[in-house]
Image (spheres, helix red, strand yellow):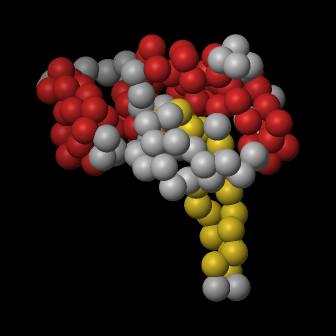
């Protein structure tokens, strides 16, 4: 059900609805449910890379190895890690200012990453603009 997806997978549904031109009878209700799920902080974006705020102060930046402070912006990227002799994909995090130095591991140019985080992130527009500015060197 679309209403169920709005609560559980708002990031993926948001992207799909943005490209769908057809009529959706309860679209306002679905968009309100997506907004609620995103604001609650329980929903994760559907694709990498994305920008969010660190829920704890436990993550370390993949580039500079410094702690990413709680409630500060972080860029999440998909990476492969070895667990029990097997490779699996999991998120890795960086300070926005560290992304430019780690483009070979992130994949793409800084402009590509900006386009992707703008499409994938679930934070509000003002926060997203601030984080992207930090990522491009304007926040230093």
Looking at the rendering, in which quadrant would you find the C terminus?
top right
Q: Inspect this view and state whether residue 13 appears.
A: yes
**Which residue: 85% across, 43% down?**
104
Q: Inspect this view and state whether residue 37 appears.
A: no
**Drawn side of residue 27 relative to residue 109, left or right:** left
**Which residue: 18% across, 21% down?**
28
Please count the marks in the image. 0
**Which residue: 40% across, 21% down?**
124
**Spot occupied by residue 39 in the image (x, y as percentages of width and height):** 28, 32
**Spot occupied by residue 123 in the image (x, y as percentages of width and height):** 42, 28
**Spot occupied by residue 15 in the image (x, y as percentages of width and height):** 44, 31
Q: Is residue 99 above or below residue 27?
A: below
**Which residue: 53% across, 33% down?**
73
Q: Residue furthest bottom?
A: 84
**Drawn side of residue 43 relative to residue 119, left or right:** left
Q: Quadrant of residue 34?
A: top left
Q: Is residue 82 above or below residue 139?
A: below
**Spot occupied by residue 95 in the image (x, y as percentages of width and height):** 64, 37
**Drawn side of residue 56 relative to residue 111, left or right:** left
Q: Is residue 90 above or below residue 14?
A: below
- Of 117 and 61, the residue lying toward us: 61
- Of 135 and 22, the residue lying toward us: 135
């Amino acid at each position: 059900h679309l209403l169920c997806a709005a609560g559980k997978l708002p990031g993926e549904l948001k992207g799909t609805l943005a490209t769908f031109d057809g009529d959706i009878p309860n679209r306002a209700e679905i968009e309100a449910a997506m907004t609620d799920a995103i604001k609650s902080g329980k929903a994760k974006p559907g694709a990498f890379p994305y920008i969010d705020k660190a829920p704890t102060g436990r993550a370390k930046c993949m580039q500079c190895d410094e702690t990413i402070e709680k409630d500060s912006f972080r860029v999440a990227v998909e990476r492969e890690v070895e667990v029990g002799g097997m490779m699996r994909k999991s998120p890795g995090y960086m300070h926005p200012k560290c992304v430019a130095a780690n483009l070979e591991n992130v994949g793409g140019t800084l402009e590509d990453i900006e386009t992707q985080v703008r499409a994938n992130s679930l934070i509000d527009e003002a926060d997203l603009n601030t984080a992207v500015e930090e990522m491009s060197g304007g926040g230093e």
